[in-house]
Amino acid sequence: MTHTDLHYQTLLEVGRRIQSRELSSEEVTGYMLQRIEKLQPTLHSYVTVMADKALADARSADREIAAGDARGPLHGVPIAVKDLLWTAGTVTTHGMPLNKGFVPREDATTVQRLRDAGAVILGKLQQTEGAFSSHHPDVTAPVNPWGSDLWSGVSSSGSGVATATGLCFGSLGTDTGGSIRFPSAANGVTGLKPTWGRVSRYGAFELAASLDHIGPITRSAADAAAVLGAIAGSDHNDPTASQQPVPDYLALMTRGVRGLRLGMDKAWAMENVDEPTRQAVSDALQVLRALGAEVREISFPAVEQVAGDWAMLVGAEAAYAHRDTYPQQASAYGPELAGLIDLGRSLDPLGYQAMLRRREDFTGEVHTLFETVDLVLAPVTPFAGATIEGIARIRGNPDQRVSRLRYTAPFDISGHPSITLPGGFTETGAPVGFQLIAGHFREDLLIRGGWAYQRATDWHRRHPESTP
């Protein structure tokens, strides 16, 4: 194939070319598999490449499209999924060598819905152990393509790296404390964490069930809209999946931000962050204002306490999720995940109830805020361009760890949706991201904001030079 830039086209662009029969899904899939084979030894973003199945599915998509039976924008497009989502007949490890023999008999609901939309699944993407904060000692972590010393984000590390380097046209990640947003910001891509309950969690290994969110990581807000539209909705296998109808996100997307109320708490969002982060947020504010958003100063609810509660809440739920294997097989666990579970198992019921009360109060305060604004602008992390060494130091400092979570974990605790967008670079060339947050089930507003911002800027079209 002579289309040397094909791998960096957006999901919607390559989908249109496949569905118009300018390209075949089979040739695009074969091209992507060759690219994976070339770059996987350096980037380590895949756990399992499903080459034979992907090519068979691509040929099937081509036959359906040729017969006039195109299913929608994902039909024939090669994407990939995080390795905690079940795939029938293919090992699903959850980032844990302990699960290397687990072969699901069925697909996760999200995977099945991608297949129903005609997407071609290239394979399973690497993640941290149990979707927590670090990779298992026996696992090679994915490499950030913007710099080998840079943090690739957790826990959907492979999803961020593969999407940024054109090893898939989009991916699925999960977010319990920032695990879609961290790798999206770190790798310069777009990530959408939906409202809790917007997307079924059936067939997904748990970290913490009441905080786990499944969503897309793509190279544009428009692509995220297409993927979310395919995977969202109620599910008889998951009673916590919302019954609310799924909007046509692509149809609503082009309404932009004119007239939307954009909330900004300057003290919370702009103080105690580094200069590249401050600049990205400030620039985003100006762009969105110029596009017609009505900027309003707000006072965001205090996040320090709930960010501090996050690890204990996750630990308690993780202890339950791993009850069949921990502590019985504790030697198979890495130190970070084992420490989290031990923390959860040590929790006293009175302390746990106090945290639940704080969670409910905080969620209510954020919900009330969205009666006065449509979107809130905030950083993803206080410091851009984090290095692997720097993150290792933070893990040993509880105060710094809570500080790093203050823009992400609160919205897993409250269940509010967020979109992460590329917004610039540090002086050393590391990507800088920011996020927009919306009210429950207002992903349409996030997508409108992301689409409008990306129409006016080109940060999302920058690609790492190390992987041409």
Image: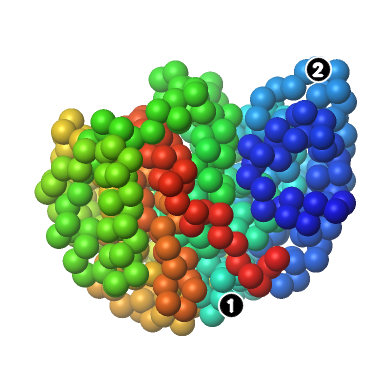
**Which corner quadrant of the image does residue 416 belong to?**
top left
As drawn, is 381 to the left or to the right of 68? left
Residue at screen point 86% across, 40% down: 26
How many numbered tags mark residues here? Answer: 2
Provide residue 427's location: percent of width, then percent of height.
42, 77
Residue 31, placed above or below residue 251: below
**Considering the image in quadrants, where does the C terminus appear?**
bottom right
As drawn, is 244 to the left or to the right of 464? left
Determine whether label 1 and label 2 are within 8 Å by CB: no
Q: Nearer the viewer, residue 361 or 447?
A: 447
Q: Residues within 10 Å of mark 1 (few under 14, many from 20)?
A: some
- Residue holding disc 2: 68
As drawn, is 353 to the left or to the right of 139? left
Q: Nearer the viewer, residue 42 or 203?
A: 42
Residue at screen point 34% across, 61% down: 280
For the residue marked with disc 2, what is the amino acid?
A: Gly
Q: Residues within 10 Å of mark 2 (few under 14, many from 20)?
A: few
- Residue holding disc 1: 148
Secondary structure of the residue carrying numbered label 2: loop
Secondary structure of the residue carrying numbered label 1: loop
Provide residue 335's location: percent of width, then percent of height.
48, 73
For the residue marked with disc 1, what is the amino acid?
A: Ser
Q: Earlier in the sequence, mark 1 or mark 2?
A: 2
Comparing labels 1 and 2, the label whose residue is closer to the camera: 2
Q: Is residue 39 visible?
A: yes
